[in-house]
Amino acid sequence: MSYAAHLTESYGLPVFTFPGPDDEGSTPLPEPDAVAWRLVSDAYDADESWTEAFARFTAAVDTTRVRAIVVGAWEDAYDSGPGGIIDALVAARDGLPALRALFLGDMESEECEISWINQGDVGPLLDAFQDLEEFGVRGGTDLVFPPVTHGRLRSLTVETGGMPVRVVRNIAASALPALERLDLWLGTSEYGGDSELTDVEPILAGDRLPSLRHLALRNSDIQDEIATAMASAPVVARLETLDLSMGVLTDEGGAALLGGQPLTHLKKLDLHHNYLSAPLQQRFRDTLEGAGVTLDLDRGRAHEDEWDGRTWRFVAVGE
């Protein structure tokens, strides 16, 4: 299973990479509102900066019709944050009245490992684009996500190999009344993921997220604790999908989740990349599949190492 891969779709639109300067004019451009526009530089030895590519884009495309932008690699992303990119997007907001989806940091490992991506303060983007319905960001290093109030955001995704606790707390403290989908990759302490269960408890209570229907708290060292808390979390009763995948989920958390409040109302329960025993996996199937719940129990690349008398287990995405 591939993680931290390039987006192929945003806002229901196929992603189209805006041609580089050497290819400009060689490929007909699609209609401005027919695709999600992926704008890239080169993380290594870039001949053109991201902001220069953005300037070419705004000159070539009717930006008043653009509905989705995907920010791909920028120059020296392993060493430099996207401050200039954020400034350029905010400065262009009046020319982007139809923008409804924005993703910052769409890079694969060959461009920049997820925990090498230097991020910045994304608050100005959410403040400037109050009509956004989907927002996502990849990379946790130096990521700043202040508490925000946003009335139209329906989907929020934050993908990290280690999410700083201040980011988790500020997302939990944000006022997002329209949010239907929340996807947080909490990550591992080895790469800066220092949140604890108490930091996500406001999300589990759901008071600030009245529209939430799809919740993913995944890729976590503390997956057992999260699963145990989900067994009685108020938010679960109104969810359609619950995703606790990609983390260190063992029989301890799995049994607690299964023994808690009913999950038979869910459309899907995603636990892929797990450390569940075969008997417990069968219990999940026996309990939920007959009720029509789609289950993903694929263990995937999850593996255990025995070293120094201890068993070591790993999240799906760290570095």
Image (spheres, rainbow, N blue to C red):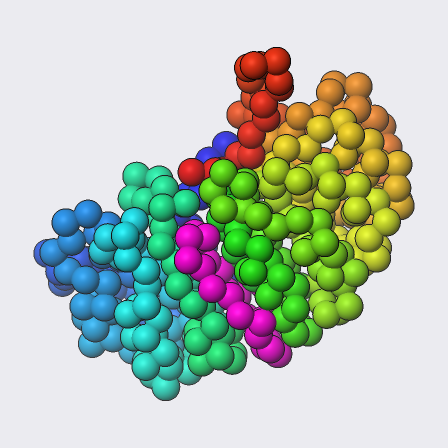
Q: Residue at x 72, y 70 (%)?
A: 208
Q: Where is residue 18 shown, x and y percent of the image? A: 26, 60
User: Which stretch did the figure color magenta?
Assistant: 133-155
Q: Nearer the viewer, residue 312 or 233?
A: 312
| Residue 93 sits inside the magenta stretch | no
Please name the predominant secondary structure of the magenta segment in the image: loop
Q: Nearer the viewer, residue 213 or 127?
A: 127
Residue projecting furthest to the front: 308
Q: Nearer the viewer, residue 299 or 112?
A: 112
Quadrant of residue 148 within the rendered picture: bottom right
| Residue 152 sits inside the magenta stretch | yes
Q: Residue at x 62, y 18 (%)?
A: 310
Quadrant of residue 189 within the rendered picture: top right
Residue projecting furthest to the bottom: 94
> Vertically, is 69 above or below 160?
below
19 lies left or right of 158 = left
Q: Where is residue 108 shown, x and y percent of the image? A: 36, 43
Quadrant of residue 303 within the rendered picture: top right
Q: Nearer the viewer, residue 189 or 277?
A: 189
- Point out the image quarter for the C terminus: top left
Q: Residue at x 88, y 36 (%)?
A: 259
Q: Where is residue 30 shown, x and y percent of the image? A: 30, 64
Number of numbered callouts drawn: 0
State whether residue 64 appears in this view.
Answer: no
Q: Residue at x 60, y 77 (%)?
A: 149
Q: Where is residue 169 shown, x and y percent of the image? A: 62, 61
147 lies left or right of 253 = left
